[in-house]
Amino acid sequence: MAVLTADMVAGLASTGASCRLDETVAPKFSVGDHVVVRNINPTGHTRLPRYVRGKRGIVDRDHGVFIFPDTNAHSEGEKPQHVYSVRFTPRELWGGDASERDSVYIDMWDDYIDPAS
Amino acid sequence: MAKHEHTAPPSDPALRVKALESLLLEKGLIDAKALDEIIDTYENKVGPRNGAAVVARAWVDADYKKRLLDDATAAIAELGFSGVQGEDMVVVENLPGLHNIVVCTLCSCYPWPTLGLPPVWYKAAPYRSRAVSDPRGVLDEFGVSLADDVEIRVWDSNAELRYLVLPERPDGTDGMSEDELAAMVTRDSMIGTGVIQAPK
């Protein structure tokens, strides 16, 4: 008997598997906080793109609590924590005469960011 | 030189997919009919017409639009769309002077229940790198030329959130039905690489 059969597909496709967790975890940051992205270079799985490492942004919204992929992908636990949409200016990311008005929003787990001093 | 009839071997990705499929079937992990069902689902049932229905509803129903912007996942589920790669949705609204565009710089994350599977260019390195570094240039190549004073917001779906753009309703559509409006909504307008033209 196959693990996945045709009659299961519709239900699985329409349900999916959210990585959001219904757990109470204290957020480390609030909307409006200035943050700096950790300049880390993990050898394993990460969802932290290189182009924002070391860059400064502002927390725009708190998406709630999610599984942390960097540990979960290696069977090292879910490590639940908040994910925030963090706003960066193109000037911060690309320097030079890049726009200060436009924005790049990227989603950051607590473990990707520190308070900006 | 003698003429030979050659059958070119399939591409590397095609071979890899065949190998994976064979392994899944031979190990008894998946039924062949389940594979057919998955392919049928994303070829014929789930695609950008779903997202277009969401957009049209938001255009005609202010209460729905508010729910959509407050809790996109729940509002989209009201219309029957949910599931894989749309578990946690965010809708961002285009306004006069504000344009949103969505990318996944890490790979190909995309809201399947509302848009179906991503187009090839969305998964390709040039779009993924340039959408964040030169969105205005990318939009120009898609035929979307924005005035200099239009603010651009780029959304990188690097995490678990999936983003859908709510495009602006074009002028001259006041008398149109919800179905007629939905028919105008393009896939690219919901990624942010297109805008919807006013009817002539």
Image (spheres, coloured by chain):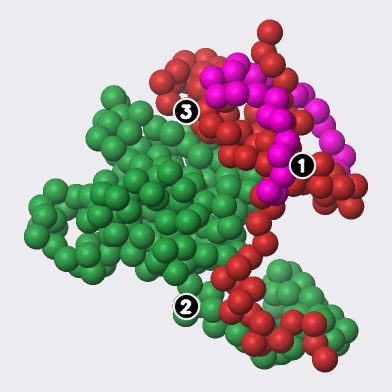
Chain colours: A red, B green
Write down the quadrant of residue B141 in the picture.
top left
Seen as rendered, the residue at the extreme top is: A117
Residue at position x 52%, y 28% in the image: A60
**Chain of the residue on which disc 1 is drawn:** A
Tell whether position A29 is magenta. Answer: yes
Image: magenta residue range: A21-47
- The residue that label 1 is drawn on is A80
Q: Is residue A109 left or right of residue B163?
A: right
Q: Is residue A53 left or right of residue B108?
A: right
Gap between marks 3 and 2 measured at Cα? 35 Å
Residue B22: x, y in percent? 80, 84
Residue B45 — which label?
2
Residue B36: x, y in percent? 62, 86
The type of residue carrying mark 1 is Pro
The type of residue carrying mark 3 is Ser
**Mark 2 or 1, which is nearer the eye?**
1
* Crowdedness near tag 3: few (<14), some (14–19) or many (≥20) residues, C-alpha within 10 Å: many
**Mark 1 or 3, which is nearer the eye?**
1
**Chain of the residue on which disc 3 is drawn:** A
Secondary element at image label 2: helix
- The residue that label 3 is drawn on is A103
Q: Is residue B12 visible?
A: yes
Q: Is residue A32 above or below residue A82?
A: above
Gap between marks 2 and 1 measured at Cα? 34 Å
Q: Closer to the camera, B120 or B175?
A: B175
The type of residue carrying mark 2 is Lys
Seen as rendered, the residue at the extreme front is: A24
Asked if labels 1 and 2 touch by Cβ distance under 8 angstroms, the answer is: no
